[in-house]
Amino acid sequence: MTEYAHGITSGAVARRLGVAPTTLRSWDRRYGIGPAAREDGRHRRWTPADIAVLEEMCRLTASGVPPAEAARTARSGAAAPLAEVPAPAPRAGAGGGLPLGRARQECRGLGRAAVRLDAAAMDEMLGSLIEEYGLVTAWEEVMAPALHAVGRKWETSDDRYVEVEHLLSWHVSSALRRVSTARPALRAGTPPVLLACVPNEQHTLPLEALAAGLAELALPTRMFGAAVPPEALDQAVRRTGPAAVVLWAQARSTANPPLARHVADTSWGVKGARTRTTVLLAGPGWAGPAPAPGMLRPGGLREALALLRALCDAADTGVAGAGATGPVATAR
């Protein structure tokens, strides 16, 4: 609890609660929802009691309560246990809580911002998360759980919250693209990593996270996106001679083992020195028996990046296609 010894900054509070710092300033100015003390008379420093009021303000506004009324209720509840504060009935179309379980605070904050359709807060929060924690932690512990929670909420709410899922997905995608475009100079001469969804698979965000991680490692990629036709994937492999091919399948119904086998068996180069690639089976759709030779199944973004870096290193030293039996076999 050392971070609370002297209070925490507005930026840290905003990230945790999923509101823009400008929103905190507006609530303070308009409704008196602000920190009890300020450092040097200027800088806001938020105590646990201050944050409890803010959390109630966020909960009430997400339930459809007008901000002025929510502020009065949140302030009046500050001196009493929150359980004694009357909770308003959600209005039609108002945002509700997401099934986030024991997710970290930043994940809850992002979920609240998504339910409020607060685009500015989502953008600011996603950028801060990646900068503070790094891409992998931000994806695995905040972005992906928030996306899953929104998806579950939509599935159990009679098709409500579709707009929340679409907006959150767009802003996560935008944040990942910003990481990709800020990449360092790519390693010269390294064969690319091909990223593709199997046919009939539309979920691309995990591949976008992988593309951003590879960009941070300065490894070249070719992103083909959703529902890549088998013929197109075959041509891409033959034309680029990739260090690895990542095939994403979100569900078992979309996973395509014959296609994965075909890609792993595809070879190129001069007779007597033919080369093959390694296929990474990414996503929950590939769950099942151990992958066949020439294929690997990473357990998540962090492991996928480690495998792909090793495969690219092997390709740089002329050991292309060694994935399942060579230098990365121990990472399986």
Image: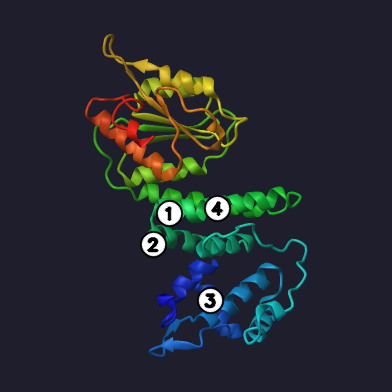
- Residue 132 is marked as 2
Which residue sits furthest left? 317
- Viewer can see residue 258: yes
Q: Position of residue 301 (x, y in %)?
A: 43, 44
Residue at the (45%, 71%) spot, across then down: 12
Residue linked to disc 1: 137
Q: CA distance from mark 2 to mark 3?
A: 20 Å
| Precedes in sequence: disc 4 or disc 3 | 3
Distance of label 4 from label 3 (alpha carbons): 25 Å
Up-down: is 247 above or below 158? Answer: above
Coloration mode: rainbow
Q: Is residue 254 above or below residue 23?
A: above
**94 relative to 196 in the view: left or right:** right
Which of the two discs, 4 and 2, labels the residue nearer the N terminus? 2
Closer mark to the observer between disc 4 and disc 3: 4
Q: Secondary structure at mark 3?
A: helix
Per the rendering, the mark at residue 145 is 4
Q: Secondary structure at mark 1?
A: helix
Q: Nearer the viewer, residue 76 or 170?
A: 76
Task: Bin the neighbour count of mark 2 within 10 Å (Cα to Cα): few under 14, some 14-19, many 20 and up.
Answer: few
Lateral position of residue 44 relative to residue 241, left or right? right
Q: Is residue 186 above or below residue 94?
A: above
Name the residue beneath numbered marker 3: 24
Q: CA distance from mark 3 to mark 1?
A: 26 Å
Q: Amino acid at mark 2?
A: Glu
Residue 63 spot, x, y in % from top left? 70, 68
Which one is earlier in the sequence, the residue at label 1 or at label 4? Answer: 1
Circle 4 packing at 10 Å, graded few (<14), some (14-19), many (20+), is many
